[in-house]
Image: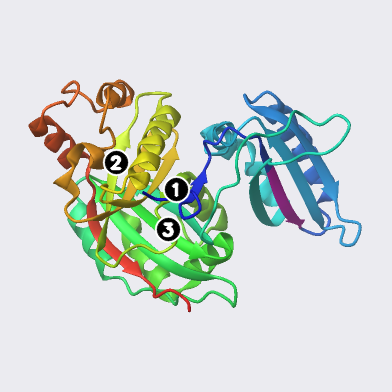
Amino acid sequence: MTTLSERISQSAFDGSRLRVVLLLDLYDGAQNRFLEVYEHLRKQVSSVPGHISDELCQSIENPSQWLITSEWESATRFLAWVNSEEHVASVQPLHGCVRDTRSLRFSVMREAGKDSAPPVSAAPRRGDGVVRHALTFTVKPGSEPVVAELLAAYASPQARVDENTRLRRTSLFMHGNRVVRAIEVEGDLLAALRHVARQPEVRALEEAINPYLEMDRDLDDPGSARMFFTRAALPAVHHVAAGPRGSADARRHALCYPAKDGCGTALARLLARQDEAAVDDPTSPVESSTVFQRDDLVIRLLDVRGPLDARPALAAGFEGGHKAAVLARLLDSAKDGVPTSDQEIARFLARSEMRLITDRRQPARA
């Protein structure tokens, strides 16, 4: 059995409050306009469920550098807001004021002070120095074979970003006309994303698939590109692994779970609990799991030893108890009722599994 000291676990579901730190670099002369936009945005955010407080600060050393800190009841409340269309629209006026941004998110683990809240009960989790993120978008129906060929053939960008950051793994999947690109980065995720976007081979790929996208974008227009990648962001809300290094024979799989309206977080939480137990089970073939969620779309990435269907209910995310019935209540696609027989579970797994286009892994640093 995996011990807690060995297990890698990163989660938005630990119940702790969230502190968000947003670093901003403003254009010269944009301070007054920025303050107007911020005040309007602050009033909007104050009514968002889960928001507790926010604070705006200006650097005493460089007046163009600003800091916004906000506190939220939980990470899931914040993610529901930051990934919403309402948020995309509300921050649009900031783009004319802000040259660069960097967002950091922290669970509140300890607090000191006369008016501090009760102690936080969440236990610290052990990480592996890897940041996980995904992008998802849809292509025009009928273009899937062409897009798959383009995605499979592109040249990998240079793994090294700088002395502290490198690309570790990129996995591309398709499910119908939906594309999911999952990346793993050691170091600074934002630096890695910018590095990748500047590489000629990646730029050529993005331009080649532009005509097939359902959502229009112009990569020569910073605003259009920013809007596309903001809407395509698919954050990792949970990751668990038996240890920092998986076995060489584990294969990567992805499953797609479209949730019913408003059920995405509950579905992601259910799958996360399942995978925590699976990783701790010495008989389980699951080595690691990452759950990505945006609104009511949930993607589950698994590294599994042996065939995925060796334990189909475990692979599907509902082995044991009444989990299949709970999952069926949360899924938008559960039109055939609750999968209980081996045949029904196998059909569910086949419907949910995404097609692997490419999985490129860089050797670990010594």
The residue sitting at 86% across, 55% down in the picture is 59
Q: Crowding near pointer 2: few (<14 within 10 Å), some, many (20+)?
A: many
> In the rendered view, would you say 187 is above or below 316?
below
> In the rendered view, would you say 317 is above or below 125?
above
CA gap, disc 1 and disc 2: 16 Å
> In the rendered view, would you say 328 is above or below 240?
above
* Amino acid at pointer 1: His
Magenta-drawn stretch contains 24: yes
Q: Mark 2 highlights which residue?
A: 256
Q: Are marks 1 and 2 in contact (CB under 8 Å)?
A: no
Q: Position of residue 167 (x, y in %)?
A: 46, 69
Q: Mark 3 highlights which residue?
A: 243
Magenta-drawn stretch contains 335: no
Residues rendered magenta in the picture = 20-26
Q: Position of residue 94 (x, y in %)?
A: 69, 46
Q: For residue 278, which quarter of the picture?
A: top left
Compare residues 21 and 308 and report the one nearer the observer. Answer: 308
Q: Closer to the camera: disc 1 or disc 2?
A: 1
Q: Mark 1 highlights which residue?
A: 239
Badge 1 or badge 2: first in the primary sequence: 1
